[in-house]
Image (cartoon, rainbow, N blue to C red):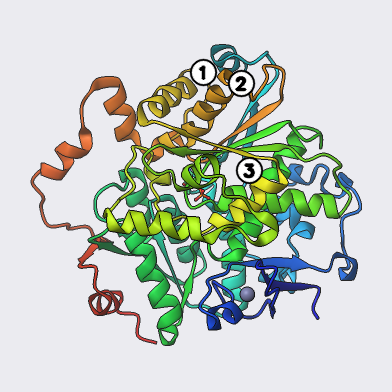
Amino acid sequence: MDAAFQQCIDPDCNATFSIGEVHISCPTCAVAGKNSLLDIRYHWDQLEHTPKSFGLFERRWMTKGEQGSGTLDFSGVWRFRELMPFYRTEDDIVSIGEGRTNLQCANLLAGKIGFKPGNLYLQYEGLNPSGSFKDNGMAAAFTHARMVGAKCVACASTGNTSASLAMFASLSEMLGIVFIGSGKIAYGKLSQALDYGARTLQVQGDFDACLRRVRQITTENKELGIYLMNSVNPFRLEGQKAIMYRVLEAMDWQPPDWIVVPGGNLGNCSAFGKAFTELKELGLISRIPRLAVIQAAGANPLYQLFTEQGVRWDDGRPDTSKIDALYNKMNAESYHANTIASAIEIGRPVNLVKSLRALDLMDGVVREVDDQTILEHKAMVGRYGFGCEPASAASVAGAHMLIDEGILSPSDRVVCILTGHELKDPDATVKYHTGIDVKAIQDQAPRSTPHGQLANEPIAVPDDLDAIIKAIGATP
Ligand SMILES: *Cc1c(COP(=O)(O)O)cnc(C)c1O
Ligand SMILES: [Zn+2]
């Protein structure tokens, strides 16, 4: 067995697969009609460079990038590469200087929401090259895509995944295909996908419909040779572990008391749990922070299942009947997630079970916050910090709610993850401050034929598999 491998997270299966294989769920469980997620695992004792202390990473971030491409030490992901050693050689690694982000001690904001000075921190993942934390995961998943020789990559997206995929695809000389639902995408994000040259399919459906279609074209239509970049891809989560490494690094390797993160597809919180599991396995930390996952009230399946119905990880055997019942109810009622925080507007999160595992490990809580509360906290982050997009502010709104409940104490050291940049969704900000709905004006505005030489218009398609494959035009 290789030192790095893939493994099914279902304890009744535990099947393992080599790193060179491409799966987005466990093929062994699929035979039994089950849909189980995979993990990337390591036999740490068989690795040449297993970290024995954090000293290995000390000051690597001071290294200057070479020729604008960035060395591995310059990357905020790959400077921790010994903690995600699934690549064969360093030549496999894809990097564009992702993850050079900032942990700010936010005393003004702390005062407004009830923390003592020195205790509230904001982790600005909006400072990534494409403006959201998604770049952390894409650096890792594109590394794997390159290892397996992928030429074409795809994702469904509420916006930031497509922006990040489009950027990495164009730099890796792969064809990027992004599926965006009709309607809610923030223009900052759409503009990135178009500008980086991704083939952009605007499917008549929501995010969940787009994800269903992308899974079909990548798994049931394998002959198309399209590699899936959504966070069901376990390699994405390997890269996203680095967000926690950077938080620890900025805090001199002393774990905070709480990590607060918005939850959409639940990949980020799952990655955080995995990061701490492994740091503990390696003996690098002795204490694990607690976790708060904050959902929007209009997209709250984890809140309903975990907080209201008490569904737990239960050693890998969560009560799937409750999960199925919720999704059946959503189908019966034609429920569609609906929130101003478009990045977390997701009804059926793919990493739900992994998030239960993270909540178990990190003694977590889940809360929901409504759109108005999100917008008020977004405005506070803007006024007293660097600003963020609506979904990101859910973390601060959640921290505020938890301090009011007495679950967080004013003297706890709390890190809120600000997942995306303020400029991702300027329309939401303008509407908050002026009442003007820029997006409504844009949608009604007369359109001329695009005339730029590189004009890359979204392709409107019905939610129909044949029409989608035709629109992709990616013949094998
Ligand atoms: C993707 C995204 C999220 C949600 O992260 P998950 O890993 O899907 O839970 C939150 N905020 C922003 C800005 C995002 O782009
Ligand atoms: Zn399995």
Q: Which residue is mark 1?
A: 384
Q: Residue at x 37, y 67 (%)?
A: 212
- At numbered mark 3, what does the secondary structure look like: helix, strand or loop? loop
Q: Nearer the N terminus, badge 2 or badge 3?
A: 3
Q: Residue at x 75, y 42 (%)?
A: 62
Q: Nearer the N terminus, badge 3 or badge 1?
A: 3
The amino acid marked with disc number 3 is: Arg
- At numbered mark 1, what does the secondary structure look like: helix, strand or loop? helix
Q: Which residue is mark 3?
A: 100
Coordinates of residue 247 in the picture (x, y in percent):
70, 38
Indicate which quadrant contains ligand 2.
Answer: bottom right
The amino acid marked with disc number 1 is: Tyr
Q: Residue at x 22, y 57 (%)?
A: 452
**CB atoms at circles 2 and 3 under 8 Å apart?**
no
**CB atoms at circles 2 and 1 under 8 Å apart?**
yes
State the CA–CA distance, disc 2 to disc 1.
8 Å
- Disc 3 under 8 Å from ligand 1? The reply is no
Q: Which residue is mark 2?
A: 106
Quadrant into which the C terminus falls? bottom left
